[in-house]
Image (tube, rainbow, N blue to C red):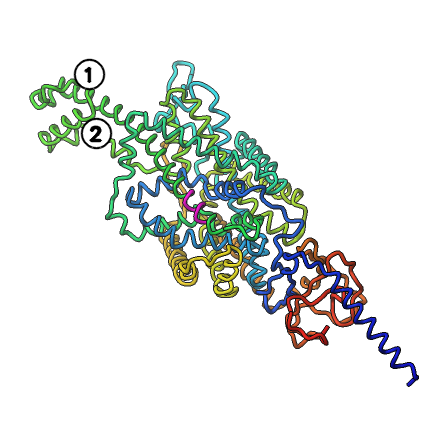
């Protein structure tokens, strides 16, 4: 050894020590948030590693302008057409006010907990539905794809309903309204009322013949209905323009589309309460029938309504919440939105039955007038004796109460001959018991009631504009459930993807604007979403509670919220909600098996609906809808299980920090024969080995060349290891 070797070695050691001191001195000690930021290397075997711990959001990810905008978006998505035309029908059908009891119980058992779960998962992982479930377990990545498929199916026909509303909206700017009276038909000799309209009613005829121009069966296409085709195109253009910039564009529209329906509902409620007979409708609505409440069917339908009212499983809830800050109080959001949804349903029910009570009162008055004339004819003909009519009865201005008194007397006296007299009871309750839902409520019953309003065109414009806004609010969430996961996963431009998605959906949606299109809407509504969404939400629950881990999830919630959520959610998620969902799935399958698959076809000759079974090809389409919606789950599972896709390919990424945030960038590893740390277990990682090492880059320091001992080189320092011996540095 040369004599000066010790001196040289000492100088080299001093340089190393000085370089370490320089590195330590360059550390930004004032950046507390940065000190807490950490990177855990993505391990394909252990997906619970948090690649975003301590970072709020990637720089590229957009965010809500305000908390109000976000709440309005979630409310707009969850509050839809079903609140107006499905909930009132179920409430009336299943025991009136008593139906609210099972609905509230199931809202607390499955509604709020599962809504909270989706909000928390989206906010925690900050991805769309595909990225969220792929992060928890790549084998369950198919859950997100299944949600996208269901969203696409639902968007196809849901926008058709918006198109129908746009058509009625455009026809409302005239007085009298075009569905006010039956049209007259002229021939060479005389003028007469359209027979199809005379056999039904003016609003029924206008809906089936003028608006839909409906065919008599599913197999009879009848060609495109050009009026509805234009309205469908307008609906997709509105959705595309609103969604093209993501939440930056749709978020601003939410202020109008989410709030305007409440203005209309309140106006309708005030106007409805001033109408004659409205109180009868509301009283009939909320009169509890406790014996019906105990039937299992009531609980099944209440659970289904809770499930779909909140938009569970669609991916829209997850997509919207993924744009939140990580410390947002999503528990408060879940409770708030759920109860806003519930009270909106109750408000809509009050409005619907106030108006239907007014309509029933008008129909009942006509019934009393017509049957009073029959009684006068029977008196003149001698079929009835004048002695049986009370002296105070005046048939020229008879009330409903007086008519019912006369009716009961005649029924008792002429017991054997009563049926041949052809008299009707004219009870307002009988008219209110005729339950209507869906398009039958919005486009027939409600439109008929509005024709009797003073200034009926104004109310018609308001009503159908409300339906358009309710539909658009739900469509924004549905499309977001498609766009966000695909953008997050495949890194495509959101604008281009939105335009392509809307164009494809419009052209596929042309099957719904054929003359037989209404039957396809019924088919998709019955079969494309119910069972697939139930399976999706069950798998979501299992993924979070069993695979990710309920205890780890509760810790994440504590970290996000700043407080520990109630243990109530722990037991709901782990035991109660999965059990209730499985029961609902089994009940839905049984119900589907017992109910003959078919649709109600409109028969022009009889002017009545007639039940038709689906043809063989129709059954194939129904089954295909359910299979296609859930098919991504087993496909992705088998692909991951058989390692047909290399998981490690996606985990080889360089990571740089910017303002304490993580940005992943693809790395070209060609020619890099150094030891790499990319998801290996501690035993596989080259020395120095600290198990799951945590790295932090210097603030403001340039990226240094890769060091022989690891991917990040000496430009990265070990963080949060105060007890590490100096020799390990």
> Could you say where residue 163 lies in the image, as x and y percent from the top left?
51, 34
Picture layout, residue 288 above or below residue 146: above
Q: How many tags in the picture?
A: 2
Tell me the crowding category of disc 2: few under 14, some 14 to 19, or many 20 or more residues within 10 angstroms, Cα based: some
Disc sitting over residue 396 in the figure: 1
Closer to the N terminus: mark 1 or mark 2? 1
Which label sits in the foreground, 1 or 2?
A: 1
> Could you say where residue 421 lies in the image, as x and y percent from the top left?
17, 27
User: Left or right: 432 with respect to 10?
Assistant: left
Q: Is residue 347 visible?
A: yes
Mark 2 lies on residue:
424
**Mark 1 in CB contact with mark 2 (< 8 angstroms):** no
Cα gap from disc 1 to disc 2, whole angstroms: 18 Å
Instruction: Name the residue at 91% across, 81% down.
Output: 4
Q: Nearer the viewer, residue 378 or 641?
A: 641
User: Left or right: 428 with respect to 234?
Assistant: left
Instruction: Name the residue at 34% across, 43% down.
Output: 90
Region of the chain picked out in magenta, as a range: 334-340
The residue tagged with tag 2: helix, strand or loop? loop
The residue tagged with tag 1: helix, strand or loop? helix
Tell me the crowding category of disc 1: few under 14, some 14 to 19, or many 20 or more residues within 10 angstroms, Cα based: few
Q: Is residue 655 magenta?
A: no
Res 497 → quadrant: top right
> Could you say where residue 284 lies in the image, as x and y percent from the top left?
27, 36
Disc sitting over residue 257 in the figure: none
């Amino acid at each position: 050894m040369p004599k000066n070797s010790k001196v040289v070695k000492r100088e080299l050691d001093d340089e190393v020590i000085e370089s370490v001191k320089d590195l330590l001195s360059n550390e930004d000690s004032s950046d507390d948030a940065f000190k807490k930021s950490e990177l855990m290397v993505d391990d394909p075997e252990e997906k619970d590693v948090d690649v975003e711990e301590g970072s709020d959001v990637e720089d590229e990810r957009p965010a809500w302008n305000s908390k109000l905008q976000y709440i309005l978006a979630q409310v707009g998505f969850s509050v839809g057409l079903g609140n107006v035309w499905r909930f009132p029908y179920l409430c009336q059908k299943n025991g009136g006010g008593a139906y609210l009891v099972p609905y509230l119980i199931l809202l607390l058992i499955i509604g709020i907990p599962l809504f909270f779960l989706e909000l928390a998962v989206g906010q925690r992982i900050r991805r769309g539905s595909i990225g969220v479930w792929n992060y928890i377990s790549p084998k369950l990545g198919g859950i997100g794809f299944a949600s996208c498929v269901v969203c696409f199916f639902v968007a196809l026909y849901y926008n058709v309903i918006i198109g129908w509303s746009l058509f009625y909206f455009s026809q409302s700017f005239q007085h009298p309204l075009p569905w006010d009276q039956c049209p007259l038909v002229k021939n060479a000799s005389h003028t007469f009322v359209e027979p199809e309209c005379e056999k039904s009613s003016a609003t029924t005829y206008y809906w089936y013949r003028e608006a839909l121009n409906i065919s008599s069966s599913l197999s009879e296409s009848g060609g495109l209905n050009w009026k509805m085709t234009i309205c469908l195109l307008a609906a997709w253009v509105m959705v595309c323009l609103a969604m093209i910039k993501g939440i930056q564009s749709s978020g601003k529209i939410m202020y109008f589309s989410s709030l305007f329906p409440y203005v209309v509902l309140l106006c309708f409620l005030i106007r409805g309460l001033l109408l004659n007979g409205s109180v009868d409708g509301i009283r009939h609505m909320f009169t509890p029938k406790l014996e019906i409440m105990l039937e299992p069917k009531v609980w099944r339908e209440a659970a289904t309504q809770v499930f779909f009212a909140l938009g569970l499983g669609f991916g829209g809830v997850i997509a919207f919440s993924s744009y939140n800050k990580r410390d947002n109080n999503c528990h408060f959001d879940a409770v708030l939105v759920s109860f806003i949804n519930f009270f909106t349903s109750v408000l809509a029910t009050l409005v619907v039955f106030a108006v239907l009570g007014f309509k029933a009162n008008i129909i009942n008055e006509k019934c009393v007038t017509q049957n009073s004339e029959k009684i006068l004819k029977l008196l003149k003909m001698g079929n009835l004796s004048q002695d049986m009519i009370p002296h105070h009865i005046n048939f020229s201005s008879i009330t409903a109460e007086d008519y019912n008194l006369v009716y009961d007397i005649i029924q008792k006296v002429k017991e054997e001959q009563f049926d041949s007299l052809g008299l009707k009871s004219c009870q307002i309750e009988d008219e209110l018991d005729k339950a209507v839902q869906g398009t039958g409520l919005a486009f027939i019953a409600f439109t008929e009631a509005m024709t009797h309003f003073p200034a009926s065109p104004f109310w018609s414009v308001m009503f159908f504009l409300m339906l358009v806004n309710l539909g658009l609010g739900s469509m924004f969430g549905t499309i977001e459930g498609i766009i966000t996961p695909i953008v997050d996963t495949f890194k495509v431009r959101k604008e281009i993807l939105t335009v392509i998605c809307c164009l494809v959906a419009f052209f596929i949606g042309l099957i719904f604007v054929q003359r037989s299109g209404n039957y396809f809407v019924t088919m998709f509504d019955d079969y494309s979403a119910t069972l697939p969404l139930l399976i999706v939400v069950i798998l979501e629950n299992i993924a979070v509670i069993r695979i990710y881990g309920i205890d780890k999830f509760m810790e994440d919630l504590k970290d996000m919220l700043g407080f520990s959520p109630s243990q109530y959610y722990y037991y709901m998620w782990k035991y109660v909600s999965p059990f209730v969902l499985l029961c609902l799935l089994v009940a839905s399958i049984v119900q589907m098996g017992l109910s003959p698959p078919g649709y109600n076809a409109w028969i022009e000759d009889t002017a009545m609906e007639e039940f038709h079974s689906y043809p063989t090809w129709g059954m194939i389409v129904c089954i295909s809808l359910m299979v296609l919606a859930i098919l991504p789950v087993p496909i992705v599972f088998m692909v991951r299980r058989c390692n047909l896709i290399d998981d490690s390919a996606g985990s080889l990424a360089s990571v740089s920090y910017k303002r304490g945030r993580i940005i992943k960038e693809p790395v070209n590893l060609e020619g890099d024969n150094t030891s790499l740390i990319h998801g290996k277990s501690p035993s596989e990682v080259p020395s120095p080995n600290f198990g799951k090492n945590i790295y932090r880059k210097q603030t403001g320091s340039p990226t240094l060349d890769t060091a022989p001992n690891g991917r990040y080189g000496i430009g990265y320092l070990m963080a949060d290891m105060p007890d590490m011996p100096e020799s390990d540095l």
